[in-house]
Amino acid sequence: MAHHKSAKKRIRRNARRTDINRRRVSRIRTFVKAVELAIASGDKDAAQSALRAAQPELQRGVRGGVLHRNTVARKLSRLSARVKAIG
């Protein structure tokens, strides 16, 4: 248990930030899942629009500090390659 006032404040702050970051990551996963489902269905137009919607969400994750920029670059690259490969 924290004894100093600053340590107690840090515990409260960490709890708030954890909650915010969890929501951010969950939202990102939802957008990526929409792209995955569109790819699985084979609908190229739906997959492209879902990818267009997911890109800014992933970039916000980088800006917010919940995802590494190279991780997002890799995910976007792989998703776009899979969308492009749809016949």
Image (spheres, grey):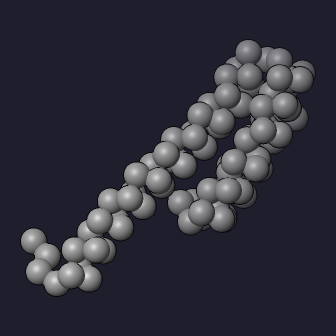
Task: Check the image and report above or below for 29 versus 20.
Answer: above
Q: Would residue 52 appear left or right of 64 to someone viewing this image? A: right
Which residue is at 53% across, 60% downward?
Answer: 66
Q: Quadrant of residue 5?
A: bottom left
Which residue is at 38% across, 59% downward?
Answer: 16
Mark yes or no: residue 71 visible.
no
Specify the quadrant that holds the N terminus: bottom left
Which residue is at 34% across, 66% downward?
Answer: 14
Q: Give 63 or 75, whichever is nearer the viewer.
A: 63
Total numbered labels: 0
Specify the quadrant that holds the C terminus: top right
Task: Check the image and report above or below for 38 versus 24.
Answer: above
Which residue is at 83% across, 18% downward?
Answer: 43
Q: Give 56 or 80, whichever is nearer the viewer.
A: 56
Q: Position of residue 10 (x, y in %)?
A: 30, 74
Q: Would residue 66 appear left or right of 62 to someone viewing this image? A: left
Task: Check the image and report above or below for 20 versus 10.
Answer: above
Q: Position of residue 86 (x, y in %)?
A: 85, 25
Q: Quadrant of residue 9?
A: bottom left
Q: Position of residue 45 (x, y in %)?
A: 89, 23
Q: Would residue 10 appear left or right of 75 to someone viewing this image? A: left
